[in-house]
Image (spheres, rainbow, N blue to C red):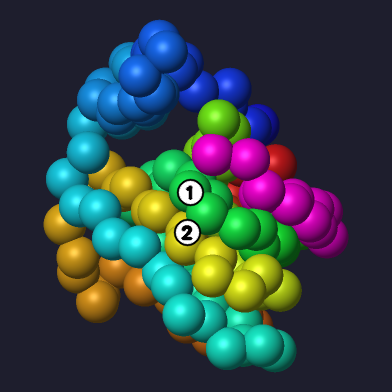
């Protein structure tokens, strides 16, 4: 499977709650980069790319958004992130689109790589050709 929802381990008491991230603690990889998406206007789609090497962990820390996951072989999944206790792990070479952000949504994104524009595939047809070529070589 090249994506999965993860129930995050929460620490807390009567004073409040905390969720931490490190390899094998709420995150399946070593974190090299983090960023968050916020103030997204209605109708805007973010992402629209695949990555050759990066894995992602997405957490809606406020509000909600939808994530379209496409493996390039006809399997498309739409996931709703609306709970800060859950994260969506996405493996490398998966097309992803984030959309339908609620008002005041904040989407935290953790990755296992530093930013490198050369590892992004931003053209969907190019992505599908790469995936289909990989599938032909493995069959």
- Cβ–Cβ below 8 Å for labels 2 and 1? yes
Answer above or below: position of 82 versus 40: above
Q: Position of residue 126 (x, y in %)?
A: 56, 81
Foreground of the two, 129 or 60: 60
Labelled disc at residue 93: none
Report the residue at 31% width, 48% height from top: 111
Please say whether residue 79 is visible from this viewpoint: yes
Report the residue at 40% width, 54% height from top: 108
Answer above or below: position of 69 versus 17: below
Report the residue at 55% width, 30% height from top: 85
The residue segment tinted magenta is: 74-84
Task: Find disc 2 in the rendering and name its residue.
Answer: 107
Report the residue at 54% width, 70% height from top: 104
Q: Is residue 64 left or right of residue 32?
A: right
Labelled disc at residue 61: 1
Say which quarter of the image contains residue 132. Answer: bottom right
Callout 1 environment at 10 Å: few (<14), some (14 to 19), or many (20+)? some
Q: Helix, strand or loop at disc 1?
A: strand
Callout 2 environment at 10 Å: few (<14), some (14 to 19), or many (20+)? many
Q: Position of residue 52 (x, y in %)?
A: 38, 59
């Amino acid at each position: 499977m090249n994506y999965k929802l993860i129930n995050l381990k929460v620490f807390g008491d009567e004073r409040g709650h905390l969720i931490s991230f490190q390899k094998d603690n709420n995150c399946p990889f070593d974190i090299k980069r983090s960023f968050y998406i916020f103030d997204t206007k209605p109708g805007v789609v973010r992402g629209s790319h695949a990555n050759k090497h990066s894995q992602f962990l997405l957490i809606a820390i406020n509000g909600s958004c939808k994530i379209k996951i496409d493996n390039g072989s006809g399997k498309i999944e739409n996931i709703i992130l609306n709970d800060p206790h859950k994260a969506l792990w996405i493996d490398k070479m998966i097309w992803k689109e984030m959309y339908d952000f609620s008002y005041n949504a904040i989407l935290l994104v953790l990755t296992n790589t530093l930013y490198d524009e050369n590892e992004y595939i931003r053209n969907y047809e190019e992505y599908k050709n790469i995936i289909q070529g990989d599938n032909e070589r493995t069959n």
